[in-house]
Amino acid sequence: MNRWLNLLIVVSMVALLSGCSDRLDLEDASFPLLVGYDLDNKNKLLTYVSVPEFSKDAKKKTHELGITAQTIRESRQQTDAYWPTLFQARKLLVLLVSKRLLEHPDWQRILDVFSRDAKNPITCRMIMYDGPLSDVVFLNQKDQPFLPLLLRGMVDTKSGRSETVKTTFQDMHRLRLENGMTPYIAEIRLDREIKLSGTALLDHQGRYVDSLNAQETILLQILQNKAKNAVSLTLAIPGQHKRGPLNTDKLSFSTNKTKTKIKTSFQQDTFQFDLAVHLSVALTERLFPYDMDNKTTELEKAIAEQLKKQFEQLIHNIQSKRIDPIGLGIHAQAFTYKPYKKVEEHWGQTLSQANINVSVKVNMEEMGTIK
């Protein structure tokens, strides 16, 4: 019995010693909450980090640093040279990239370390900024929270209302390997203050192609059948008079329920997609007089017609760019597998020649509290 007890003690001590071999005390570590990557005028990689300051005597909430390096791993080594502590990326919240970087064909290769090193987080939000990242990283707004918390909060709350997308590094990696769908990430702009502008669309190689504003992003997520929570849209109704400088031909509504059915077929060597969109809405704003008691059906048809035009414009834009953020390729793979497998390597080109039809039905369930 004593022999087995002594063996158990030895094994326990070895386990404890091996578990503490890579121990790092908290006071010896720095946890960047934001990392940004950009290219300078000579296409050299620029790396930015934002680290929170917890000291009561600190004059700023965060400490920022920008360096030039050839790889991300090299940039980490150089960053450590500027700090008395060691950098640990496990708490990373935001991965900020510039539009200039996303336009480079091989930009995703520099992120190899995120996939290869298990200590790097894969749930950080990916966000694109249209401009030099130094404008955002070194902004230091005194009346705003930490920049990483601000950006993550913007993405999480606005994606809940379908006004942008919440794409993590893991999502980006998955979409990059998916032939039937192209990636997309949230996009911000700087208009004196940081502003969430919508969604950046990427091609199958991950390069930047186009941008969607908030309303176009909502339309995209309706087509994806991902707009589960209530979303708000504003439309101009033709035939209504404008009064003076005000746009009094508009109305707004919020959705109680959205549902999109996609029918996929392959006919005469061409893919065909029939998208049926059904919206149950509540009227939240009407800037023109209208007989709601007797002409509700006509207004529902007018809203459906305007929505159909906006959906068709969005789809036309997607086809012209040879991308597929809707994920129609996934439906093609599921329902027309054999013809899809022949074209999956150049699905964007194939989708640009497909027949995509949209029908919209609107059911107005609520008209507001004021008659």
Image (cartoon, rainbow, N blue to C red):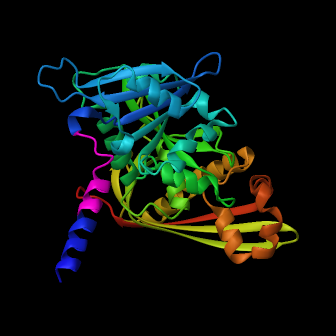
Along the viewing direction, whichever of 362 and 197 lies nearer the viewer: 197
x and y percentages locating residue 238 in the rendered image: 54, 47
Which residue lies at the image location 63% right of the left edge and 40% below the top edge? 109
Q: Is residue 5 visible?
A: yes
x and y percentages locating residue 141 in the rendered image: 28, 22
| Quadrant in which the N terminus is drawn | bottom left
Q: Which picture quadrant has residue 356?
A: bottom right
Q: Is residue 14 left or right of residue 224?
A: left
Highlighted range, magenta:
13-25
In this picture, is 345 found above or below 114?
Answer: below
Question: Does the magenta-highlighted stretch encompass residue 88?
Answer: no
Which residue lies at the image location 53% right of the left edge and 62% below the top edge? 301
Q: Which picture quadrant has residue 211?
A: top right
Marker count (numbered):
0
Q: Is residue 239 visible?
A: no
Outermost residue toward the front in this view: 3
Outermost residue toward the bottom in this view: 1
x and y percentages locating residue 144 in the rendered image: 25, 28
In this picture, is 191 found above or below 122?
Answer: above
Along the viewing direction, whichever of 68 and 215 lies nearer the viewer: 68
Along the viewing direction, whichever of 221 and 185 lies nearer the viewer: 185
In this picture, is 260 found above or below 130?
Answer: below
Which residue lies at the image location 77% right of the left edge and 62% below the top edge? 344
x and y percentages locating residue 89 in the rendered image: 38, 40
| Quadrant in which the C terminus is drawn | bottom left
Q: Is residue 182 left or right of residue 172?
A: right
Along the viewing direction, whichever of 79 and 212 lies nearer the viewer: 79
In this picture, is 366 found above or below 173?
Answer: below
